[in-house]
Image: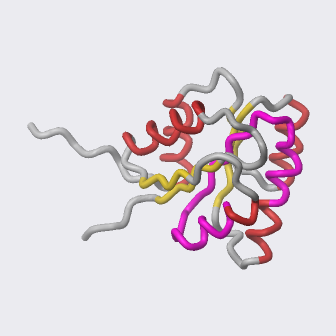
Amino acid sequence: MTSSPLRVVVAKPGLDGHDRGAKVVARALRDAGVEVIYTGLHQTPEQIVAAAIAEDADAVGLSVLSGAHLTLFRRVLELLKEQDASDIVVFGGGIIPDDDVTALREMGVSAVFTPGASTSDITTWVREHLGAPDEPASAS
């Protein structure tokens, strides 16, 4: 029995042009067996949701460093709901104050990773909460 890999759209919404962190996370997820679709810089929430639906994504990971995280995460969640795609899990990270992490969680963001979170923390969370495939067993 074969199952398709977990699919995650990694996106940089808004005007923030710093994507190193998003690319590092995307690579770590790929190395962990997740199929990653990276949308690139300067994506609108509408573009991100369209990509998630078109790619049959299980989750969307947003990277926001611009300070517009409350607005951008909220809009992505609203659009997913409007498109009957609320089953797509939204998580993300960036430079986000603790009070805003709480607000994001209350609005429906499943996890928020702030500076200091390791790629191991993120891939472990994905594996445990989204049903990511186990790493391939090594040959004995």
Q: Residue at x 73, y 77 (%)?
A: 83
Image check: 47 left or right of 137?
right
Indicate whether residue 62 is drawn in magenta.
yes
Q: Position of residue 94 (x, y in %)?
A: 72, 33
- The residue lying at 62 percent from left, 55 percent from top is 60
Q: Quadrant of the C terminus?
A: top left
Q: Is residue 53 left or right of residue 31?
A: right
Dividing the picture into quadrants, the one containing residue 17 is top right
Above or below residue 101? Residue 43 is below
Residue farthest along the top direction in this orientation: 116
Which span is picked out in magenta?
Answer: 48-75
Q: Nearer the viewer, residue 50 or 32?
A: 50
Q: Quadrant of residue 4?
A: bottom left
Residue 38, image x and y in percent? 53, 51
Point out the image quarter for the N terminus: bottom left
Q: Where does the image place residue 90, in percent across and percent down from the top left? A: 68, 54
Tell how many labels: 0
**Where does residue 80 sit, x and y in percent of width and height?**
73, 69
Q: Which residue is most to the left? A: 140
Q: Is residue 15 left or right of residue 87?
A: right
Residue at x 59%, y 49% (from the top left corner): 40
Would you say residue 90 sits in the magenta stretch?
no
According to the image, what is the colour scheme of the structure? secondary structure
User: Is 19 or 61 nearer to us in this picture?
Assistant: 19
Please identify the quarter of the rendering in which residue 20 is found.
top right
Q: Is residue 99 left or right of residue 88?
A: right
